[in-house]
Image (cartoon, grey):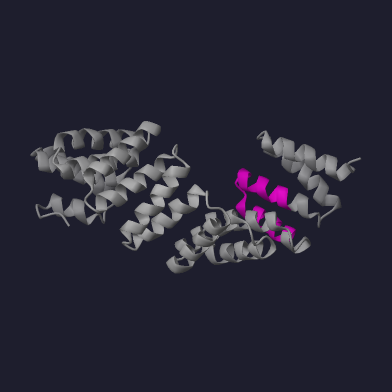
Amino acid sequence: MPSATDTCLQQALAYQQAGRLTDALRLYEQVLASEPSNARALNFAGTAYVQFGEVARAVELLKRATAAEPNYAEAYHNLGVVLRDTGRLEEAAAAYRRMLEIVPNDAEGYNDLGIVLRKMGKAAAAKEAYRHAIDLRPDYADVYYNLGNVLLSEDKVEEAIQSYQRAVGLKSGDPRLYRMLGIALQSRGELDEAVMNYRRAVDIDSNYAPAYANLASALVEKGDVLTGVEYFRHAVQLDPESVHAHAGLGVALHDSGDIQRALAEYDVCLTLDPGNTRALAYKIGRAHV
């Protein structure tokens, strides 16, 4: 028969999963008032405080959970997520590494570690983590996507394309995968293939503004400037604060001879991003950079 504490935690977790965070936190705090070192209560409460927007309190509780139960892998994972999302990357990496000491066959943990390492600028270590995740779980599409992103940033385009293609084969309903595959193909000059992948991305998600901007860019590069202008306009409608879309629209309008509207788009770019050198170069009449 479940203990009173277990019953209380089960009810709190049910409240949390239903979005009733105030009720969940009340019960978690009730348990912690009588059992301040209850690792499960500390962990669950920590995740609830993240949802509630009280990150400092969440970190405190998750650290207490790991101190109360040093082999509590889930608490280390949750701590790593919070630290990563708040920019405390060194601490996040340490939390993930400790988690992986406890559960060394956790592919998701290696993927999460790779994400943090890349944010830290440690590309080689990130790739090692991603490849370890792939060894553990060869059908993990998100890892191939993340690995592809690192490879593309290193101009290893062929390897990046192979990684994105593997991701697409495993997770064909994810528009991000087609977009990044398109970017890699476009960088290699394979414009028809790039356009096909961008179109696939927007077919999956008709509100995916970055893919519309990429599609427009590829069409302009193919010489279909007017269609590119229309897709850039659609991207701007979907995401009015996208500097990339406004800049691309400005360039396309400029190429189509619509100088006044191009200048207006450059002005929008410079309002959103005063340091945008491409928009500034066009604005003052120089060749784009």
Position of 147 relative to 169 (above/below): below
Q: Nearer the viewer, residue 252 or 55?
A: 252
Query: Would you say residue 61 sits in the magenta stretch?
Result: yes
Q: In this view, does 22 lie to the left or right of 185?
A: right
Residue 24, percent from left and from top: 73, 40
Q: Is residue 276 visible?
A: yes
Q: Residue at x 67, y 33 (%)?
A: 18
Residue 268, percent from left and from top: 24, 43
Q: Is residue 258 left or right of residue 198?
A: left
Q: Quadrant of the N terminus?
A: top right
Q: Residue at x 66, y 54 (%)?
A: 57
Give the residues in magenta: 43-65
Position of 84 relative to 217 (above/below): below
Q: In this view, does 176 lie to the left or right of 261?
A: right
Q: Residue at x 20, y 51 (%)?
A: 279
Quarter of the figure with residue 121: bottom left
Residue 233, percent from left and from top: 24, 34
Query: Would you say residue 152 sits in the magenta stretch?
Result: no
Q: In this view, does 258 lie to the left or right of 44?
A: left
Quarter of the figure with residue 252: top left
